[in-house]
Image: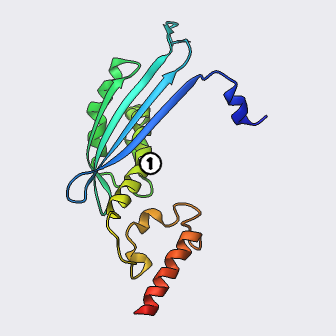
Amino acid sequence: MKLSEFAKRKATIHTRDIRLATHPHKHSEIIVEGTLIDKSHRDTFDIIGKIRKPGIIHHIAVWLLIKGNPLKIAHAEAQMYRVPMDECKSTLVTTLEKIVGVEVKPGYSNTIRKTIGGKNGCTHLAHLITIMGQEIVHGWLIDKRRQKLPVPDSMENFTGNEYILNSCKMWSKGGPRWKILKKALQQKTNQA
């Protein structure tokens, strides 16, 4: 039996829903919003044996103001609507200021985890901000492409190349999207 079929027949234990969205701001800035909701679907016991009923465990929202070229976090806000312990909320006071100025580039995820994850803050908050990295890139690129841009003169002048090239198999050097862009560059050169 396929795992997908097996999973359909079993009760759900836990779910994590994550929603990411990008909003335009001003002067080519964007606001990236992330929400994480963890939910238990069965009775559990906490560490001291107290029973916990099914329901929301974590409901955390984050808003990041992003400035471009290079992409970096200019301001961060968060809200913990639901957490297992009230003390969890204290991590907001000491963590968000530490990520202001962080650039969205290779190593972003590790930087966020080391800066505000684990014993330095909140694993759940760090996870949400980490995965917001891809939304930052996609939202920024889509915002930049609201208007038709000319074919770049070279691969180096391709807006967003540092985020797209080699980001997946399709955009790997020699991959399908790479070949399409190279062909467009060649056609532009031949027409000049």
Q: Residue furthest left?
A: 26
Q: Residue at x 68, y 23 (%)?
A: 10
**What residue sits right under mark 1 in the picture?**
109
- Quarter of the N terminus within the rendering: top right
List x then y, in percent, for residue 147: 32, 67
Say which of 126 and 41 sits in front.
Answer: 41
- Quarter of the C terminus within the rendering: bottom left
Q: Is residue 18 left or right of residue 98?
A: right
From the viewer's perspective, is residue 96 above or below residue 175? above
List x then y, in percent, for residue 94: 28, 34
Q: Residue furthest top?
A: 50
Residue 114 visible at all? no
Q: Residue at x 31, y 54 (%)?
A: 72
Element assignment for label 1: helix
User: How many labels, in total?
Assistant: 1
Q: Badge 1: few (under 14), some or many (20 or more) residues near its Cα, within 10 Å? A: some
Say which of 75 and 140 sits in front.
Answer: 140
Q: Quadrant of residue 137?
A: bottom left
- Under mark 1, the amino acid is Ser
List x then y, in percent, for residue 28: 25, 59
